[in-house]
Image (spheres, grey):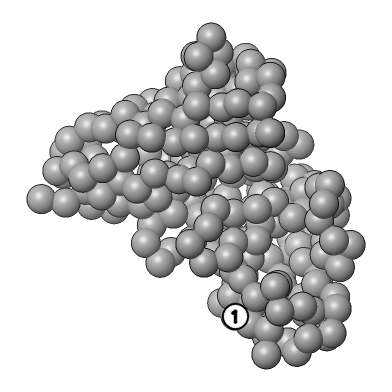
Amino acid sequence: ELQLVESGGGLVQPGGSLRLSCVASGFTFSGYHMNWVRQAPGKGLEWISYVGSGNNMWYADSVKGRFTISRDNAKNSVFLQMNSLRAEDTAVYYCAKDEDWAFDSWGQGTLVTVSS
Amino acid sequence: QSALTQPPSVSGSPGQSVTISCTGTSSDVGIYNRVSWYQQPPGTAPKLIIYEVSKRPSGVPDRFSGSKSGNTASLTISGLQAEDDSDYYCSSFTSSTTWVFGGGTKLTVL
C-alpha cells in the first residue's frame, strides 16, 4: 500500500528554521516527482515546491530563497528545509506524489506554527 | 502567480447535478491540459478526483467528470450523494513551472 508520512512540524519563532521530512513506501520512490503543498488554518491549498525524479527543483515565489527541497532516494525520503520562517508560513504541510501533472497521493500532513 | 478563481460555495439536493467552475489565464488553465481537481473533507488530506482535465483515477465514481473551455475548467458532480459534501479545489500547472490552486469551493448537499 502506498504511504507518505510527514514529520518534523512544530512550534518555531519568527526567523527560525525547521526541517520537514516525508518518508514514502509502497512505490518505487526514485522514479517519481515529489512536492510539498501547504494549507494555512481555515484557508486553501498552496503549492510550494517540487523535486523531480531527475533532482530538478521548482519553488513558489512565496518561499523562494527561504525554503530548500531535497530528496534521498536511498531513504525513500523528501525533505523541506525552511529558513527565515514568518507568521504567514503557519500551515499544515503535506508531501504529495506527482504523476501526470497532478498530486495523486498525499500524506496526512504536519503542522508548522510560527509564533513568538 | 494569482490563484485560480472558484465560487466559494455551491449546493444541491441528493440526486441533482452541480458544476464548479475554475477560471485561470492563458498562462495556466488555458495553455495546458494539466488541470486537476481534489476533494477534501474536513480534517483530512486532499484526494485526487480528476487529472488532465477529464481523466478519473481508479476508484473515483463516474459521477465525477471534468471539462475545459478556454481559460475555464469545470467539475461536474452528477447524482449528488450525501458523502459528496466536502471542499473541492482545482489546480493547474503553469508556464512558470509552478502549480496554482483555486481558492476552494464548499459543496453542501442539502
> Which percent across, then down, holds residue A113?
25, 49
Camera-side residue of B46 and A33 = B46
> Which percent across, then down, holds residue B97?
60, 35
Q: Residue at x 69, y 42 (%)?
A: A104
In the visual, does A84 lie left or right of A111?
Answer: left
Say above or below: A41 vs A116: below
* Image quarter in which the N terminus of chain A is found: top right
Q: Residue at x 67, y 90 (%)?
A: B110
Residue that carries the numbered disc 1 in the rendered image: B9
Say above or below: B105 vs A65: below
Residue furthest to the front: A1
Q: How many numbered tags mark residues here? A: 1
> Which percent across, then down, holds residue A87?
23, 52
Asked whether the viewer can see residue B65, the reply is: no
> Which percent across, then down, holds residue A45?
50, 55
Q: Given the image, on which type of amino acid does mark 1 rest?
A: Ser
Q: Residue at x 50, y 21 (%)?
A: A77
Say above or below: B71 vs B12: above
The chain ID associated with circle 1 is: B
Q: Residue A64 appears in which quarter of the rendering?
A: top left
